Image: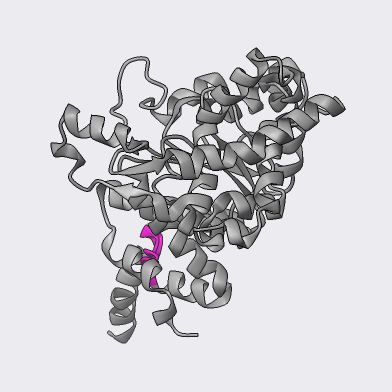
Amino acid sequence: MTSSDFPILEFVLGNYKNFNARALRDATLAYWEHVRKGGKMYWTLAGAMSSAQLGITLAPAIRAGLIHGLSVTGANIEESLFRLVAHDHYKDFPDYRYMTKADDTRILDQRMRRVTDTSIPEDEAFRAVEKILVPMWKAATENGTRRFWHEYFYDLVLQLPKSKLQGNREDCWLLAAAEANLPMVVPGHEDSTFGNIFASHVKFGECDASIVKSGIEYMTALYDDYKRLSKGRGIGFFQIGGGIAGDFPICVVPSIKYDLEEPVKPWAYFCQISDSTTSYGSYSGATPNEKITWDKLTEKTPMFVIESDATIVAPLMLTALLECKANEVQAMRVLERTKPAKRRSTKAKQRKKKAPAARRRTAS
């Protein structure tokens, strides 16, 4: 394998020298160094990453063992499923910046739900999945079984016949996570389309609210997941956006330390991709070192903030990492070639300067 098998890695190394580009490069190299030496990485997804089809690179990264746990919003987990079952019915609106209220009303009348420049089809996505998921909830109510929110989605996506799929299975991160039975939390899952649908069936008396385990139970499960994943080199934290998807899991470290009063390793790496402006009181816009005061990170934690669009940055990083994972030996050679030459110490330079003078004195 030659270095031409690392086009994205070499592009990043060769071009990304300063500003947010440098942060992307350094975060990618630190990520690779961490997982190469046996470390784990925990990802958090806020925003509409699934509708933006991040699964095209996220799913292969999960299968390649580059991601070891997930915290996602309820919207992201369901929208990954929607892309799988209704991909051909999505509509795109590249001119969304110039649309009027009347334009969006027409989209509503077409039974589409716009997400920036794309849209989710009501009937082919929401209603098609509802026909499968609601019976699962009703069966759980009858049987008195209780499960986490994501476990219902894991079961659903694993049992879907190929005839029901429109999207590429290889591009569905939810399917990849389900096949790996990846540890997951879905904090605030009530704030999603299917969270609302579930609430309506509870209101009708058709489902018992208790069949879905609570957010508190998610945290108690995360205690155990974190202790297991942080063994050895530790586990890093890779955050897209902010909000509850990021804040919920990062709190596990201080909670184990102060609330359980048990020893715990700090997060071993931190990277956030965010287009949020640093501002007063904003979690998404807070600088990473603020988290030191909350005992979530330490001054020794490698920290990176990439202020950019995650739909641009994350695929670049993941592709570079996948190239490294495909051939670790050759990847290390590529990385070694790009390292700056080590500067000699001042003492070594002084010794070299003195040597010719000493020889001259001897010769005379």
- Magenta residues (range): 338-348
Viewer can see residue 188:
no
168 displayed left or right of 273 = right
Does the magenta-highlighted stretch encompass residue 232? no
Write the residue at 63% across / 58% down: 65
Residue 175, position as x, y percentages in the image: 62, 53
Residue 2, position as x, y percentages in the image: 45, 85
Residue 146, position as x, y percentages in the image: 79, 27
The image's colour scheme reads: one colour
Q: Which of the 4 image quarters holds residue 72? A: top right
Residue at the right extreme, as displayed: 143
Quadrant of image for the C terminus: bottom left
Residue 140, position as x, y percentages in the image: 79, 30
Q: Is residue 66 above or below residue 286?
A: below
Tell me which secondary structure the magenta stretch mostly adopts.
loop
Q: Is residue 339 above or below residue 246?
A: below
Write the residue at 70% across / 52% down: 159
Write the residue at 71% across / 38% down: 151
Does the magenta-highlighted stretch encompass residue 347? yes
Q: Is residue 345 above or below residue 251?
A: below
Viewer can see residue 181:
yes
Q: Which of the 4 image quarters holds residue 361? A: bottom left
Q: Nearer the viewer, residue 359 or 159?
A: 159
Q: Is residue 359 above or below residue 252?
A: below
Q: Nearer the viewer, residue 18 or 176?
A: 176
68 displayed left or right of 14 = right
For the image, the number of numbered tags is 0
Q: Which of the 4 image quarters holds residue 128? A: top right
